[in-house]
Amino acid sequence: MFLGLDGVEISLIIVFACLFGGIMTGFPVAFAIGGAAMVSFGIIAALDSGGILVANVIDTSSEEYHALVNSGVARDTVSHFRNPDLPMMTTELLSGGWEQALNRNLSFIVNRMNEKVLAGQSIETLLAVLMFVLMGITLERSKIANDLLTTMARVFGPLPGGLAVSIVVVGAFLAASTGIVGATVVTMGLLALPTMLRNNYSPELATGVIAASGTLGQIIPPSIVIVLLGTLAGDLYSTAQEERAALVGCSDALTYLGSPAVLSVGTLFQAAILPGVMLAGLYAAYAFGFAMFRPEKAPPIHDENAAGTGAGLRNALTWYLAVPLGILVVVMMMVFGGLAGSQSVAVSSVADIGKQAELRTNVSPQCQEAMIELHGQDKWDRAVATQAEINEAGGTRTQAERTLSIEQIAEARSEAIANAPPVGTGLLVIVTIFGIVLAFARGVAPTLSPRPLIIGGAGLLAALAVDAAFIGPLNSPGYRFLLLAVPFVVALWGLRIAAGRLGQNELLRVVFPPLVLIVAVLGSILGGITNPTPAAALGAGGAIMLAAYRKLQEDGRSGQGILIATFAMVIMLLFGVNFDLRVNIENVSFQNWVAYGITIIAYSVAMIGLLWACWVLFEKRVLSPVVRETAKVTSMVFAILIGSQMLNLVVISFGGEHYIQEFLRSFEREWVVFLIVMLVLFVLGFVLDFLEIIYIVIPIVGPVIYGGTMDPKWVTIMIAVNLQTSFLTPPFGFALFYLRGVAPASVTTWHIYRGVVPFVLIQVFGLALLWMVPSLVTIVPDLIGH
């Protein structure tokens, strides 16, 4: 063989050479990947037909192989990497010839396109990509970045390095609202870099902080990277753990692990919060520290037009910090004291299944041994003892045995009514949010009369009092609405005055609308209310309405129609939560018919408002480029998905995927395997975009890194942060090219390279910190999950 390499190794070199060559030609990446798949397969097929490429495999008929298997070594774990002394034999590279391999690939391509692109289980999650892209591009076109940069510069500018810190804050904000790295880097490069240079900031610090902050969209939710990576990782983790369970003799992953092998995009969003905030904090800390030691290269900026409250630090601490914290403390005391909580008194007609063992114990001896090794002897002994108690009590009760009688259901319902807290959770959340808004309004305008705010606060307290005194868990939603109408009308009058005062504050006026949108999108996902796809649809619709409102304001036209449509959406949510809107069932009550009618009207108003917002953006020539750009990005994602599937099938056809996985599994320690994968991904990040890495490399190495004992959330977030690091690393980091394209001539490439080095080191430090303290990734999902 050539240079001692067998056919599989040479074929892998051919595939990746074609891939890199196709990318370097300048053709669109989506077509270069598919082209590389066809060209590489043609070359490999020609060499295989000529007898030039052959594969060296273990001779499974040899005595040495049979002796190894008979000694207890599983057949699936035998490889020439782990067992180099086993006899080898030569076989054809493409089993059955290139014609049969081509037929297999074509059938696989059709099946995979149907599964991955057209009608598979993951297609619903992938639809979130389209809507998150639409949301991000719409917000970008609505000049939100420009206003944020201007406002944050006024807030942080008087501090040493304040402009750099403001860039980090805006970068994190745009990451949470757009999630598109290229757009964020280009936008901030165009808007912020000239301002920083004009104010005597070091070109190195300016370019470094812009490039680094722009890449936060890789990790801060809702990140497109996490959506795509999470969709793939969920399938890989589930399949790999099932194979792992089968390998040790267990029936399925649930039996072996004691919990389902499930990984969702929503869970990954939860896991990414702390790492994203940590990296943003490290960036800001470096910028501030740089300014402290070298103030001449990051001077403070004093803006004569900066708007302030003029009320001093004491006022700010009181109304922005102390009062909101006091409200939250009172709320927590009410919840933990039993004064507030869920008022549901629904009682199941079937009793709980009863005490259950931690692990399944009715398993084979081989599976039992593997489970003890994984979970420990103590946990296994507890499970055995618990199962013994269940068996002595007659075993788990059947469905009929657990069905409650009418008297038992009535008794359980009476107990639930007696234990129901006086105040409902939903009302408490609304009152808390409105109370904090009133506090902020007082802090913004301390010289104005507090009387409207006091009246609004009194209305909120009256709502709590009415709920506690006159509303019980058995009262109908219509009765609740009627009783709470008067106090909420009073509260809303005060809130209307508060909103007007908040609108006079430049910072709140710029930050509050997109912040509400981000909280609505992320809150619905992180709170488990919905999955990423409906949340992305909410974000896209909200972004369109927000952009239209801004355009109307710029033209001096009233945006009241947009506000009415937004209010209609809130009404839809409230009525949908509090009323049963099913009208295709028997015995629909009058109040539910009324609620259904109001909801239909609110839905119609909201849709009319959304369509009007689209017309406003179309009229202002914003909607057309937004739709074109969204179609372009989304088409690129799915085209790369199709091309990468073709390339993966080529690698599979000659055994390349199996070869790479065998090599990785030859290492005994999991952390060594994962470290090798991370290093490979880091290097590939120099020349491949994250989409190619996710769809080409991860499917090959995923069965190995997701098939062990490491937490899949931690593995996925580590990969995402690693890809973010490769975006920054000279000389090929994509963020550097984005910034170089918009930087003025006075900023050289060498300035950009030197500027990002400290931030690359910060990224490496962040990766090391996540490696040493995995709880930074897992703590938020664990807390929310419980």
Image: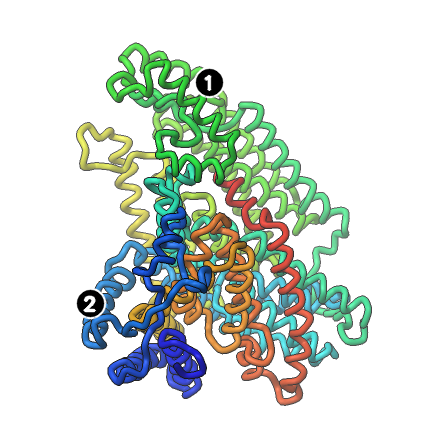
54 sits to left or right of 466? left
Measured as percent of width and height from the top left, residue 312 is found at 77, 52
Instruction: Name the image colouring.
Output: rainbow
- Residue 700, placed above or below residue 580: below
- Of the numbered discs in the image, which one, if any, rests on residue 107? 2
Camera-side residue of 304 and 398: 398
State yes or no: discs 1 and 2 in contact (Cβ < 8 Å): no
Helix, strand or loop status at disc 2? helix
Residue 30 on image: x %, y % = 35, 77
- Left or right relative to 387: residue 758: right
Disc 1 residue type? Answer: Asn
Name the residue tied to disc 1. 419
Instruction: Report if residue 778 is visible in the image.
Output: yes
User: Looking at the rendering, in which quadrant would you find the N terminus?
Assistant: bottom left
Q: Nearer the viewer, residue 113 or 126?
A: 113
- From the viewer's side, name the closer residue of 535 and 717: 717
Q: Is residue 544 above or below residue 296?
A: above
Residue 343 x %, y %: 43, 26
Mark 1 or 2: the one toward you: 2
* Residue shown at the point (35%, 71%) measured from the top left: 56
For image coordinates 82% across by 69% down, the residue present is: 293
- Seen from the viewer's position, the closer of residues 256 and 638 is 256
Q: Local crowd at mark 2 within 10 Å, few (<14), some, or many (≥20)?
A: few
**How far across and how far down the image is residue 579, in percent?**
32, 34
- Left or right placement of residue 770 versus residue 653 in this view: right
Would you say residue 135 is visible in this rendering?
no
